[in-house]
Amino acid sequence: MMKYLSAAMIIVFAFLAVNVMAVDSSREITYDNGGMGKVVFHGKTHADKGLSCNDCHSGLFSMKKEVKITMADHTSGKFCFACHNGTKAFNACTQCHQK
């Protein structure tokens, strides 16, 4: 009986851990970067691609909404550009920057 209870608890904890790490598909975060146009992060778009929070928040970003991306970052492979580099994902200005 104890074996079954332990196995059930492991399964429940594993299920909860996966759900916690999934991208919140309803989440949208808007970054207003001045004259270049606002950039909106769409959680649903990233979740639909199979990404989890930990894919980006394990090293590319902190969990705080305070990233200040510079023009130099666009070609650095840091932040969004680790994926949005024209190879793995698009990197056209107008696909992120909305005026």
Image (cartoon, rainbow, N blue to C red):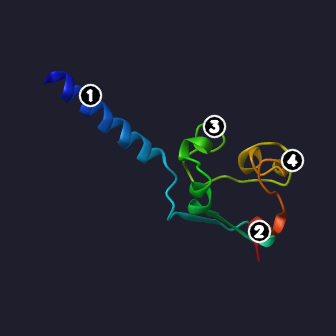
Q: Amino acid at mark 2?
A: His
**Which quadrant holds residue 43?**
bottom right
**Residue identified by numbered label 1:** 7
Secondary structure of the residue carrying numbered label 1: helix
Query: Which of the two labelled residues, at mark 4 and mark 2, occupies the earlier sequence position?
Result: 4
Query: Which of the two labelled residues, at mark 2 and mark 1, occupies the earlier sequence position?
Result: 1
Q: Amino acid at mark 4?
A: Thr
Q: Is residue 4 above or below residue 58?
A: above
Q: Position of residue 36 (x, y in %)?
A: 80, 69
Secondary structure of the residue carrying numbered label 4: helix
Which mark identifies residue 59?
A: 3
- Residue at the spot x=80%, y=57% of the render? 90
**Residue identified by numbered label 2:** 97
- Disc 2 to disc 1, how far (Cα)? 48 Å
- Disc 3 to disc 4, how far (Cα)? 17 Å
Q: Is residue 59 left or right of residue 1?
A: right
Query: Which of the two labelled residues, at mark 4 and mark 1, occupies the earlier sequence position?
Result: 1
**Which quadrant holds residue 11?**
top left
Which mark identifies residue 75?
A: 4
Which numbered mark, 1 or 3, is in the foreground of this view? Answer: 1
- Disc 1 to disc 3, how far (Cα)? 32 Å
Q: Position of residue 95 (x, y in %)?
A: 77, 67
